[in-house]
Image: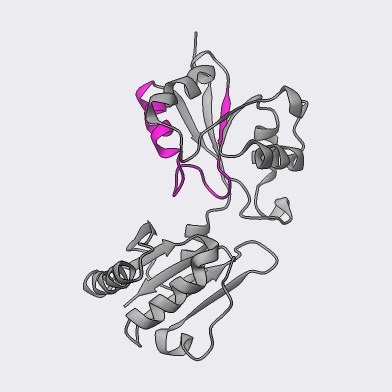
Amino acid sequence: MNAGILYLIPAPLGLGDIAWAIPPAVRQCVAGLGHFIVEHPKTARQFLKQIGCVLPIQTIKMEVLDEHTRATEYEKLLAPVLTGNDTGLLSEAGCPAIADPGAGLVRLAHQKNIRIRPLVGPSSILLALMASGLNGQRFVFHGYLPVEPDRRAKKLVQLEKDSIARDQTQIFIETPYRNQKLLESILHACRGDTILCVASNLTLAGEYISTRTVNDWKQALPDLHNQPAVFLLHG
C-alpha cells in the first residue's frame, strides 16, 4: 500500500481575515483532508470551518501533537499516513515544525519515505525579517531566551557580540505575557547604537513593526504585554 502525503499547513497568526494569510489553493487543498495532527483540536476545528472544510467537522480525525508528546508516540501519529491517508500537520499559529513541536514528526516521516509537502502560509519569523530592514542574508533564529533575568541579560550581550562579529541578525521570541519584560531587558543589556526591530501582531489588525536604535527605543516604549511579537537584533 502506498503511503499518503503529509501536508505541512501554516495557520493564521491570530484572529483576522483568513484571505490575507492563507492562499485559495492552500485552502482548497486543506479543505479536502480527513486526517490531521494538531496542537489544539478546538482551534484546529475553528480553522477548518473558516477555510470551508468539505467534510463534516465531526467526521474529521484529529490526533494531538504538542509539547507533551513523546518521540515514542510519533509512529502512532503517522499510522494513518502509512496506510494511505493524506494527513495535515497543523500548527497552532504560523508554520509547523518551526519553533513548534512538529519537527521530530517530520524527520520520522522522512525516515519512513513519506512524501512531505509544505504549503504556503504565514511565518512570523520571515515576515518580521522581511520588514525589519536588517541583514536578510545572514540571520539566526534562537527561539526563546532564558527567563531568569541575569541569564537572559548575559544571553542578550552574547547575541549582540555575535551579531557584530558575524554581521548577523539575531531573531528571538517570547511568550506574549513576558514580551514587555523582554523589551526592557534588551534596552538595559544592549549598547545604545545596537539596532532593534520589534514586529508585533503580524498580519493582524493591530500590526506594529518598527526598527530603531536601542537609544531611540528608550525614548518611547510600545505596550507589548500579551501581544505576540518577534524581536530582531543587529549590533
In the displayed structure image, the side of residue 11 where residue 188 appears, left or right: left
Left of 67 or right of it: where is 43?
A: right
Would you say 229 lies left or right of 16 here? Answer: left
- From the top left corner, tell me how far across and down residue 114 is, in percent: 44, 23
Give the farthest residue toward the left.
165
Residue 95 sits inside the magenta stretch: yes
The quadrant in which residue 53 appears is top right
> Of all residues shown, which one is farthest toward the bottom?
219
Render colour scheme: one colour
The residue lying at 78 percent from left, 26 percent from top is 56
Q: Quadrant of residue 13?
A: bottom right
Most extreme residue toward the top, as rendered?
A: 1
Where residue 191 sits in the image (x, y, percent)? 32, 84
Say whether residue 229 is visible.
no
The answer to whether residue 220 is above or below residue 234 is below
Magenta segment boundaries in residue numbering: 86-112
Question: Vertically, is 219 above or below 162?
Answer: below
- Where does residue 71 sit, x and y in percent of width and height? 38, 30
- Tell me the residue at 57%/70% (across/down): 225
Taking depth in this image into account, of 219 and 128 the one nearest to the observer is: 219
Screen quadrant of the C terminus: bottom left
User: Would you say 194 lies left or right of 37 here?
Assistant: left
Counting labels gives 0
